[in-house]
Image (cartoon, rainbow, N blue to C red):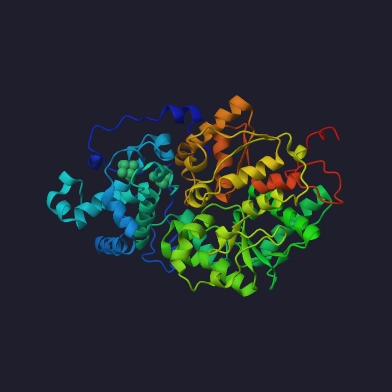
Amino acid sequence: MSDLPRPEALFANIDYTPPKADWMDVPVDIKPGRYCYAANPESVKYLDLPNAHKWNPLDDDWGLPANWQEIIFNGLRERLHKYRSFKIFMDICVRCGACADKCHFFIGSGDPKNMPVLRAELLRSVYRGEFTTFGKIMGRFVGGRKLTPDVLKEWWYYFFQCSECRRCSVFCPYGIDTAEVTIIGRELLNLLGLNIDWIATPVANCYRTGNHLGIQPHALIDMIDFFCDDIEDITGIRPEPSFNKKGADILFVTPSGDVFADPGTYTCMGYLMLFEYLKREYGLDVTWSTYASEGGNFGFFTSHETMKRLNSKMYMEADRLGVKWILGGECGHMWRVVHQYMDTLNGPDFQAARMEVPSNPITGTVFKNAASTKMVHIAEFTADLIKHGKLNLDKKRNANIHLTWHDSCNTARGMGLLEEPRFVAKSVVEKFTDMPEGTIREQTFCCGGGAGLNAGENDELRMMGGLPRANAVKYVHEKHGVNMLGCVCAIDRAVLPNSMAYWVPEVSVCGLHELVANALVFPGEKERETDLRGEDLPGMEDE
Ligand code: SF4
Ligand code: SF4
């Protein structure tokens, strides 16, 4: 983040004064720090996606095929026919402006084209100008325009400044979901090979090795083994996880970010400890897969087709292993895909149909909400265990933590997971304070790096987009002494540490199961002196 202005300067530069010219006359200005690098053509080729080529967003010539407009028009026509919601979103916006100030990227940048209404209008204006009779005849008078190379560049710049978080949709009286417009916009850009590399290469990796980071099966086992070493050092208990076990009751799938970087790694250690505890106490039979080693789905940020392709591997692996159901880790968009798209994408003959409706073998609770997906979020699972008194927890071990809760966009707005994480969190920490209403639950602010935007080169954009979230954290930090921001999403755990370091450096970031594992008391464990991060537990500072 070395080239970033200091937070005060970035904040002072936010200018909400609209330009004097009509928005159609304001040319796109692609600014370093606000865009992600172009997709590596090798990754695009690997995925068998069209028009893989080398290009640079700062060049005039993007190396487009000669018939690029025809490709876009055909793609747009096909999607207007296929997705009725998209067609409706193109037709019914009355430009009331209720969504205008709800986007974190607009709040943090002041750029009018980051208003959800205008972001969608970038595409809607072309739909009007090229596909409707009124628009073809009346053009600008009815908000229509032609598709030009500059318009295409504008699409690319602003559809990759939308984290598809859906906050704006909560405020639209017509239920227009601008994230869906962005999704279609990105699909159209992908027809021309215009993805960003932070998305294309992880998706290609996922094809090759089963996870976004390209971790091969033996390396995954090694990484988890390191975590088991650390857990043994801290607790005296060594987890013995199972991998690829045929006939196990439950398959566990989590984002690969959790095995790769802090603080996700502590969450991963938390899963390992929870499963070991449940195995020893109640005989829980859960297995990890070294092939379906990714819950996240960057295909979702590319196209419906790639989303479907990446999602299917979890279910194919569950089928291969013959498990009863899938337990999913702390991820965001994995859950949005599972809850909002998967059933429609796959239809009734999907592998999920062959599994059982999930039930907790320890408490007997049947997760009827997962009757079609056969997949349960670990926050629901752990909440159920705690509710039934199945975990021995000592909150005092987290006494140095004053927690606030970041509702991850995809789990909050995409699946309604609002109470379970709070219930678990309040069961394992002594001090918990929510951020102000209007910034949490369904109205939660995005971390600023979702939908594939957590690259390094777009730091300025991410810090701008992270401002509203950070501002609410700063409020509870200054007013109540909050020092930890919890979340159940791997992208959040990757994005928020940088955002906090920039805006509220006194606050750290953690996952839910890190806190659970710190509080979990194993029979026969040694006296713990540190938490999973190796920091002294309260009262152990002088030991
Ligand atoms: S709130 Fe809905 S109808 Fe109003 S401008 Fe935004 S998208 Fe259009
Ligand atoms: S989906 Fe989120 S990022 Fe995209 S326009 Fe709406 S509020 Fe902004």
Q: Is residue 34 above or below residue 6?
A: below
Q: Nearer the viewer, residue 1 or 167?
A: 167
Q: Position of residue 504 (x, y in %)?
A: 57, 32
Residue at image location 39% in from the left, 64% down from the top = 52
Q: Nearer the viewer, residue 353 or 93?
A: 353
Q: Is residue 424 above or below residue 44?
A: above
Q: Quadrant of ligand 2?
A: top left
Q: Position of residue 165 (x, y in %)?
A: 45, 47
Q: Judge left or right: residue 145 versus residue 438.
A: left
Would residue 117 be seen by someone viewing this image from the given angle? Answer: no
Q: Which quarter of the picture shows residue 222?
A: bottom right
Q: Judge left or right: residue 45 versus residue 365.
A: left
* Number of residue marks: 0
Q: Position of residue 378 (x, y in %)?
A: 63, 54
Residue lying furthest top in this view? 479
Q: Quadrant of the C terminus?
A: top right
Would residue 202 be seen by someone viewing this image from the given angle? Answer: yes
Q: Judge left or right: residue 347 versus residue 358.
A: left
Q: Nearer the viewer, residue 207 or 355?
A: 355
Q: Position of residue 141 (x, y in %)?
A: 15, 44
